[in-house]
């Protein structure tokens, strides 16, 4: 498997084998073969029967790990985008045609990028918070709460820790930007409509900050995995292109289901 990726569980692999290869009596052997062959895994993930089973049943996302669920949908998106001359995306409160569907599909052809995006989407099914105590003055401490889905909160958290510990924070800030811009652009647009909202960032602001923080993460010395570093650098360079397959997945496959899948 890719260095940045961890193998799917036996439960996930059994789901793939039984769905894409029904009627066999040697699934234990098949699972053993799949585990060591990423091309075999991709072939099964790409099988239309897998996508139909995951999307045709509301329990589909629960039956397998979130990472496998999104890995299958991203491979389906690659296939569907390759067949499109253009795709629709939402900009300025309306749908507009974009003519880089095939370029978006090409980005998903990079296994390290695709694995990263699947892991990233899975991470937003369980948003976390963090608490840090900081000393205001001698004998007086203040407890600060940092949300895993609020980039202002994460930026403050990054400023409160040493530079050597900022890799994961940089990466998460960029992930939040890409996730919201790609999967929930309507959320960003709705927030900016209210003149008294504390929410000041536009979609373009999120895109700019996403590129910046993916670049910082890719260059940080905390990046030990070359595949991970390459994926981060690719997302920094092609941030707006990376939004498109996420929007495609959101609009074509998840639809209203995304509100139950993600902890937003």
Image (cartoon, rainbow, N blue to C red):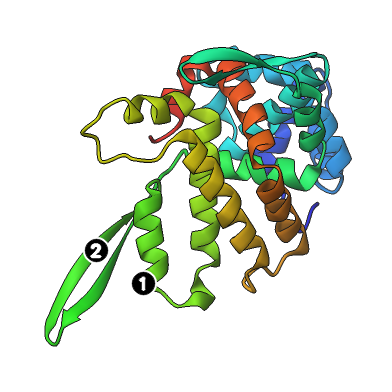
Q: Residue at x 85, y 39 (%)?
A: 29
Toward the viewer: 62 or 258? 258
The quadrant holding residue 113 is top right
Instruction: In the rendered view, tell whether residue 51 sits above or below residue 212.
Output: above
Q: Residues within 10 Å of mark 2 (few under 14, many from 20)?
A: few
Among numbered discs 2 and 1, the one appearing first in the sequence = 2
147 shown above or below 63: below
Residue located at (36% from left, 53% from top):
152
Task: Report the side of 148 relative to 35 (left or right).
Answer: left
Secondary element at tag 1 = helix
The residue lying toward the viewer, choosing from 62 and 212, is: 212
Disc 1 marks which residue?
160
Q: Nearer the viewer, mark 2 or mark 1?
A: 1
Question: Are the residues tagged 2 and 1 within 8 Å (C-beta)?
Answer: yes
Front residue (pair 232, 209): 209
Q: Residue 15's spot in the image, x, y percent? A: 69, 29
Mark linked to residue 144:
2
Q: Dot 2 lies on which element?
A: strand
Relative to 30, 194 lies left or right: left
Q: Position of residue 77 (x, y in %)?
A: 72, 23
**Residue 143's image quarter?**
bottom left
- Disc 2/disc 1 C-alpha distance (Å): 10 Å
């Amino acid at each position: 498997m890719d260095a940045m990726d961890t193998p799917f569980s036996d439960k996930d692999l059994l789901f793939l084998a039984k769905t894409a290869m029904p009627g066999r009596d040697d699934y234990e052997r098949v699972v053993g073969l799949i585990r060591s062959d990423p091309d075999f895994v991709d072939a099964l993930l790409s099988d239309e029967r897998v996508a139909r089973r995951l999307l045709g049943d509301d329990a589909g996302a629960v039956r397998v790990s979130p990472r496998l669920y999104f890995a299958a949908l991203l491979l389906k998106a690659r296939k569907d985008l390759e067949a499109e001359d253009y795709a629709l995306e939402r900009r300025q409160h309306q749908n507009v045609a974009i003519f880089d569907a095939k370029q978006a599909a090409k980005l998903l052809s990079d296994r390290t990028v695709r694995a990263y995006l699947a892991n990233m989407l899975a991470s937003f099914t369980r948003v976390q918070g963090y608490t840090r105590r900081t000393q205001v003055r001698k004998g007086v401490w203040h407890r600060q709460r940092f949300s895993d889905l609020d980039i202002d909160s994460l930026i403050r958290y990054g400023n409160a820790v040493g530079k050597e510990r900022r890799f994961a924070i940089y990466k998460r800030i960029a992930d939040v930007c890409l996730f919201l811009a790609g999967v929930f652009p309507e959320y960003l647009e709705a927030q900016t409509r209210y003149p008294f909202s504390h929410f000041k960032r536009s979609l373009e602001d999120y895109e700019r900050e996403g590129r910046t923080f993916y670049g910082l993460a890719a260059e940080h010395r905390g990046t030990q995995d070359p595949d991970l570093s390459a994926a981060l650098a690719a997302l920094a360079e092609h941030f707006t292109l990376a939004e498109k397959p996420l929007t495609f997945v959101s609009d074509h496959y998840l639809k209203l289901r995304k509100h139950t899948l993600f902890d937003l």
